[in-house]
Amino acid sequence: MMSNPVPQECNLLYNNVNSSIRRRLPCKNGSTDVRHPVILVSLSGRLDATFTVRERSIFLAYDNPTTIKMGLQMPAPSRRIYRGIGWRLLISILLVSSVVTLALTVAQLYFEYRRDVGEIEQRLAELRSSYADSLAGGLWQFDTEQIKLQLGGIQRLPDIQALELRETNSDGRQPLVIRSGTPLDNPPIVREIPLIFTDHNGPHAIGTLRIEATFEHVYARLLGSALLILFNQGIKTFIVSLFILLTVYRLVTRHLIDLAQSVDSFDLRNTAPRLALDRPISDEPDELDRMVQAIQSMQDSLRKAYKDLKSSNLDMETEISQRRETEAKLQDLVEKLTISNSELQRFAYVASHDLQEPLRGIALYAQKLEKDYRGRFDSNADEYLDYIIGNARQMYKLVNDLLTFSGLGRGLTFTTVQLDAACRTAIDKLSLLVKKSGANVRMTALPEIEGNPALLAELFENLIDNAIKFSRPGVALEVWIDCKLHEGQPVISVADNGIGIEASNQDIFDIFRRHHTKQAYPGTGIGLAICKRIVQIHHGRIWYESKPGEGTTFFFTLGQEASQQHPEKG
């Protein structure tokens, strides 16, 4: 980012720094994010610029046109960053390990739960086979003491909550019911075992044994097992996490700290020992080795860039001094040329003006000699007299055109000019010549512009006169004056069907430039130069297109147009 006016020599310095560093390091221009290390190029007092190079910060101070300071800037590494990385690593390991431990513990407890429930089911099945017959015998004999004793023994078995023995065949009397334990409202497991006594008459269903089992002991065992597993796993996880943290610190983190400190203390102006890590050298380079190589390469590149910059600065000092000397000489030369050009124009104007009177006198007295003494001398004298009169008139016209050319631009006033009127003025002034040549001059609507009406009329006059002068013998002369819009700007054209211009004659707008003999096409060679000068005074440009033998079209624009009504583009 550039700010404040930038001197040319500062631009040269910035481009040199930019290109020198970009050749060696990946760069990104315009970075100003101070939250990260950035390249900072500062030309103090007059321009500031930044660009990033591998997240390192370069500082260049441009105190004056002959002094450059360059160094590295980077925020001091915060120890909290390194401590934060260690703690985050430890917490991450603990969290992952805890989640894994918890999942494994849940799975283990689930399998233990299924195992304990299976043991309860198996125990109930064993009770059916072990106690059903003895309880049926006791009930058949109404041995309540024996039954109570057996029920108490069963109730003391693990996970048995309550038992109830009920007589089912009481022959109309109150059935016998014996209970043991405290029954639950919603016991998780309930089993009813039929009591069948067999005698010589066969089996008799005399009662049922209801057994209720509870999961309280199962849950208690699972809770104890869970606490023990979590405690053991937590201790192991913490120990493993600390070991991993210490291992990572020893293998990685401490070397990162050394790298950060080395990069932070790096100074372009001082040659420090090359970066090296405190660890054994391995045959195969790992990530840290490649990082060290990258940092070393970056430091070497920055030192090389700084050295190149210092060398470029010396070259730039010489170049700036030479440029200032050249500019001073050029300014002096421009001032001298301006004065010389002004004096030359003044001389041409004065000389042309002063030459008019002698030439007018020569022409006047030559014409008087022709009138009074023609025929009194021999034929050679009359021919010489014609030469004198013709050359005097030609010289008078040449001096008059030169006077017009040298006086262009003097004391001009600009007003709103209707080009239609200026063109009609030129046509009226050339009416005799137009009539004599038989030319057909046509004109379309032309715009209004800000300009000098006399100069614009003379512009059209010279172009029309030029078209008449270079007409083709035996071909009716046509002159078209038109205006069309090109990219929103009016372009006026003056076209004819005359002899055209050869492609080799590209200098027709130069003063006194002629490509035909005076006998074939008379003229002074100043007309088109005057046209070009008038167009330049109006901040426009003039050019032409031509085909030899078919005609020529002159185009010109007038830069200070204040168009109110332009013709449509056709």
Image: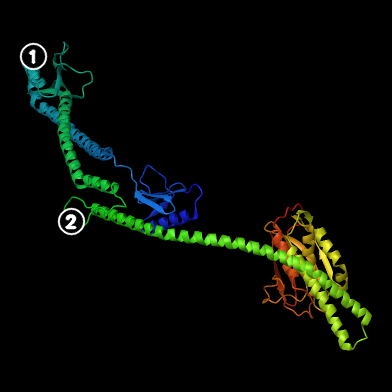
- The answer to whether 535 appears left or right of 214 in the picture is right
Up-down relation of residue 81 to residue 150 (above or below):
below
Q: CA distance from mark 1 to mark 2?
A: 88 Å
User: To which residue does mark 2 refer?
Assistant: 282
- The mark lying in front, picked from 1 and 2, is 2
Instruction: Say which amino acid is labelled 1.
Output: Thr
Please tell me whether residue 342 is drawn above or below residue 475 in the rendered image: above
When asked about the image quadrant of residue 223, the answer is: top left
Q: Residue at x 76, y 76 (%)?
A: 499
Residue that lies at the very extreme toward the top in this rendered image = 173
Disc marking residue 467 = none
Q: Give the residue displayed 11% in from the left and 20% down from the top.
A: 155
Amino acid at the residue labelled 2:
Ser
Give the numbered dot on residue 144. 1
Local secondary structure at mark 2: loop
- In what quadrant of the picture does the C terminus appear? bottom right
Q: In this rendering, is residue 535 above or below 237? A: below
Q: Secondary structure at mark 1?
A: helix
